[in-house]
Image (cartoon, coloured by chain):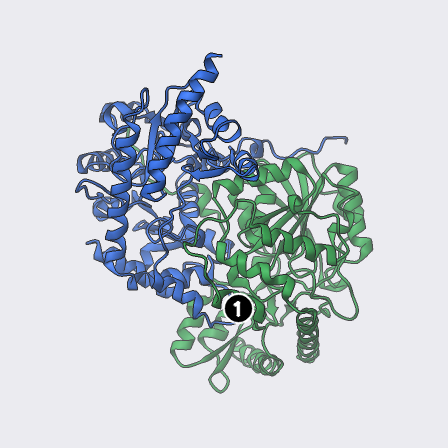
Chain colours: A green, B blue
Amino acid sequence: MIRKLHASSRLSTVPASPIRKLVPFALAAKKRGVKVYHFNIGDPDVHTPAVMMEVLRRWKTNPIGYAHSQGEVPLLSALEHYYSGLGFDFIKSHDIQITTGGSEAISWALFATCNAGDEVIVFEPLYANYNSYATVHGITLVPILTTAANGFHLPPVRVIEKKITNKTKAILYCNPNNPTGTVYTRDEVAMLVRLAKKHSLFLLSDEVYREYTYDGRKQVSLLRYMNDIPRHAIMLDSLSKRYSVCGLRVGALVSKNTAIMEGVLRIGQGRLSAGLVDQAVASALTDVPKSYLTGIQKEFEKRRTILYEGLRKIPGVTIPKPEGAFYAIVGLPVADAEHFCQWLLTDFADHKETVMLAPAAGFYATPGCGKNEVRIAYVLSTESIKRCVKILSLALKKYEEVSVI
Amino acid sequence: MIRKLHASSRLSTVPASPIRKLVPFALAAKKRGVKVYHFNIGDPDVHTPAVMMEVLRRWKTNPIGYAHSQGEVPLLSALEHYYSGLGFDFIKSHDIQITTGGSEAISWALFATCNAGDEVIVFEPLYANYNSYATVHGITLVPILTTAANGFHLPPVRVIEKKITNKTKAILYCNPNNPTGTVYTRDEVAMLVRLAKKHSLFLLSDEVYREYTYDGRKQVSLLRYMNDIPRHAIMLDSLSKRYSVCGLRVGALVSKNTAIMEGVLRIGQGRLSAGLVDQAVASALTDVPKSYLTGIQKEFEKRRTILYEGLRKIPGVTIPKPEGAFYAIVGLPVADAEHFCQWLLTDFADHKETVMLAPAAGFYATPGCGKNEVRIAYVLSTESIKRCVKILSLALKKYEEVSVI
């Protein structure tokens, strides 16, 4: 038997990160002495709380052994306390599975609810890595378009229902939304809950940006509906953005569905445990002063406003006012945003400074969408954001001139 | 359309950990005031090196942001240096993908080489979590039995070739072996290399226990053959056991196959990064004195000998002399080892002490195998091992009496 050695065909379908694939050009720019402002990735500049840093400085446990597969007891208790403080005192430790970042929570939720070939309804533009997890698990994402015209809010229920087939197993949404910055209203979340009930679908709510809401808005958590639809509801969480600990890799999957929870624990046993040190640091969340979270919320609201007011004055740029999270999908007066983003790194600089953006095409599941859009993560200081807006404005002018030639 | 809400059928096929499923009984025993010796899990009692602990105590980086998706540069360099020290100076940073523990490395290697429905040849008894990763990725493990009679060494080449079908994509093996403690000879590894070449198969070598070899043996790494079969060879590694940092979740996938490496990097981008703190701690591996590893090796060789000499004296107990790692598959004079292991926790104690063992059935892919065997992880002090052997000897006597009644 003669045959060829090939990587699996499914490996080749795993998409590259739209946020990270321009990294080599950014590195080259930095090598040339150009300062690159990172408007491309949601890695906040906000400080990690002092009480969390202290856990590292005072670390004594030796050896650094495995953690429990479900998660360390102090962290489970801390999360129970945190959810209770949000008004959800019925979420108990046994409803929580600690995951290695929100990434693992999303990936497991998809695996736990769908067989290969099943469909999951998502709203695009979407968190790009949903594409990655769906591909790995052989699941088809069925995208429903949301648009800048109504601030990327959800379409009417009939538009969603039209996409439900006998293969549909779940609706997955992100609230507040990465990459659009939209905060879904109570009516919108209630509509999704009704849909899930009516059509026997799982409802997967990615709530990583819960605290980041602006102009007096409050996030409507799926936890609010967890006793109404205990078997349908799965909430996906992460500490990364809330406490500025993206590098810690601590997330959670929360559900009252015991078959789901028992199943994900078995997957969790297969990978042994999430990190012991990371979980210990995360457990300090109960000691983080409330002012920390409100301070971050205020800071990002200010940044949002500066970005929004700055960008909307640039001719040809469109941006709906972001309502939450720290992202915006921005329309640019260019034909190919990916080319423009690359050009910003390879051919442009103003006083030896440039901006790195994420082309938005990778945030759509539908090929061809988002070609003239970029996603901006406003995780920089207000001064830097002002400078980035200026650079972008100059770059668009220059790019137009170059393109005409 | 009326339908039922069910977790995915594939979720129900993910196996529970044979090491961890008796945990509730152990917790109950502890609550009753019984001391439980953990002979069931390979979480070493050896101290994490001081230079690694120091990285935590001196931690300054704030915020704790994302790491690079491929892995942090200092850790990649440290591993390059480590592999070079083993005589493999041709392994470069670009051949290495940092993973969240060895678990992620094994899981990705299976996904990267196999489509759903493909087959992977394994040797049983096997590392139980191979079953878990294979199930998640829809891959069929094709087990080839190895037996205590020849120390769980590999069968002749014709036995393996018989199992190769047109669906076979890879051979996955663990060397030194968890759970058997077998160290494959140079001839055995060379045989697998020839097989991979002849039949165009990937060869996946799990080398987590590289340094743990006894009686003058040296591990034969697949790295030795990486230039012969650069497209076939994938080496899977972890720092967990080598530096007693199981809770750190740092592993690596090493290959010269660029399609594989580019693909796993894209999976890596999808989950953003491995932990930043864990990788920083792991990077200190270059500063760990050589005496640390040789000290551990000597300590475990001593423990191995005490365990082996102790157990073989118990009537009806069979144990081939373990050659490496820190495990042994031990045959017991009982009909149902799982029942015996549970009984040890629920009904037996000697001076308020008992032993927790892992029933071996979960280490076989073939149902019905290993029913009268247990896996022992000798990660306890020599004094504790002696005490465990004594407890086990008394327990077997008592169990026989009880069973007769």
Left/right placement of residue A107 relative to residue A23 reads right
Find disc 1 in the rendering and name its residue.
A54
Camera sees residue B172? no
Q: Nearer the viewer, residue B332 or A338?
A: B332
Q: Residue at x 42, y 37 (%)?
A: B40
> Where does the image place residue B167, in percent across and percent down from the top left?
38, 29
The three-letter amino acid code for the residue at tag 1 is: Glu
Give above or below for A303 relative to B297. Answer: below
Q: Secondary structure at mark 1?
A: helix
Q: Position of residue A163 (x, y in %)?
A: 71, 43
Taking the image as drawn, is residue A67 in sight? yes
Name the residue furthest bottom.
Answer: A351
Residue A183 spot, x, y in % from top left: 74, 61
> Which residue lies at the image location 80% right of the left edge and 48% below the top edge?
A191
Nearer-the-camera pick, B7 or A83 = A83
Q: Position of residue A164 (x, y in %)?
A: 72, 40
Question: From the viewer's perspective, is residue A196 above or below residue A41?
Answer: above
